[in-house]
Amino acid sequence: MSDINPQASKIKLGENEYGVIFTIKAIDDIQEHFNISISDFSELFVNSEDPKANLCYVLALIINETAESQIIDEKIIDELINEENAMSTAKFVFAAFSSSLPESNSDGTSGEEQLTDKVNVARLLFIGKTLLGYSESEAWSMTPRKLILLYQEYQKEHGQYEKSETLDDIIPF
């Protein structure tokens, strides 16, 4: 899968296969719904009162993000997740999440480990819309990885690029 043209990862739930992708909009919705920094994403499934309900919410969100209209809700997902597939489903969600974030930094840590605050979604939209010229809808639909790669190319083209050490350096405030 290309970082510039990310394709939805496929998950089979019951008899159906669904595409999932963590877009900027999905990350914003997760941060708002749970009132967490995206760096605390794993806490939703480990140290929460109802990790299955959290998994169902996130999975419904990212499945519906790739659909033209809502095609599945949390109740249906709740019925499809059981003890046998819960762990593999959670691993799939984490893998999809990780693939949406910018690549590892030069020190070997991932962008996810570097996040300390909520992702500044307004800043990402500003970059996508104002600097890069995408429509708001197009910017919302991008993964953070894709937007950052395009922004870095923009910076290189305009003589503004400096190698970043952390994800916080990549997304300017």
Image (tube, rainbow, N blue to C red):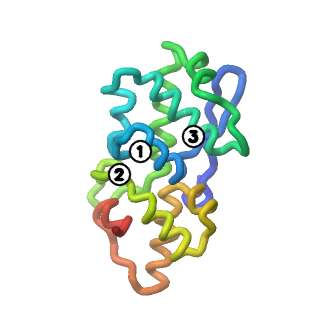
Q: Amino acid at mark 3?
A: Ile
Q: Indicate the secondary structure of the residue bearing disc 3.
A: helix
Mark in front: 2 vs 3 = 2
User: CB under 8 Å between callouts 2 and 3?
Assistant: no
**In the image, what residue occupies the spot 56% across and 38% down?**
61
Mark in front: 1 vs 3 = 1
Q: Indicate the secondary structure of the residue bearing disc 1.
A: helix
User: CB under 8 Å between callouts 1 and 3?
Assistant: no
- What crowding class fits label 3: few (fewer than 14 Cα within 10 Å), some (14-19), or many (20 or more)? many
**In the image, what residue occupies the spot 67% across and 34% down?**
18
User: CB under 8 Å between callouts 1 and 2?
Assistant: yes
Query: Is residue 68 depicted above or below 103 in this figure?
Result: above
Q: Amino acid at mark 2?
A: Lys
- What crowding class fits label 2: few (fewer than 14 Cα within 10 Å), some (14-19), or many (20 or more)? some
Mark 3 = which residue? 62
Q: Indicate the secondary structure of the residue bearing disc 2.
A: loop
Q: Amino acid at mark 1?
A: Gln
For this view, does 64 lie left or right of residue 36? right
Q: CA distance from mark 2 to mark 3?
A: 18 Å
- Which mark, by number, is residue 31? 1
Q: Position of residue 90 (x, y in %)?
A: 47, 29
Q: CA distance from mark 1 to mark 2?
A: 7 Å
Q: Position of residue 42 (x, y in %)?
A: 36, 35
Q: Position of residue 34 (x, y in %)?
A: 40, 37
**In the image, what residue occupies the spot 68% across and 37% down?**
70
Image quarter where the C terminus lies is bottom left
Q: CA distance from mark 1 to mark 3?
A: 13 Å
- Which mark, by number, is residue 118? 2
Q: Residue furthest top?
A: 83
Q: Please identify the quarter of the rendering in which residue 160 is found.
A: bottom left
Of callouts 1 and 3, the N-terminal one: 1
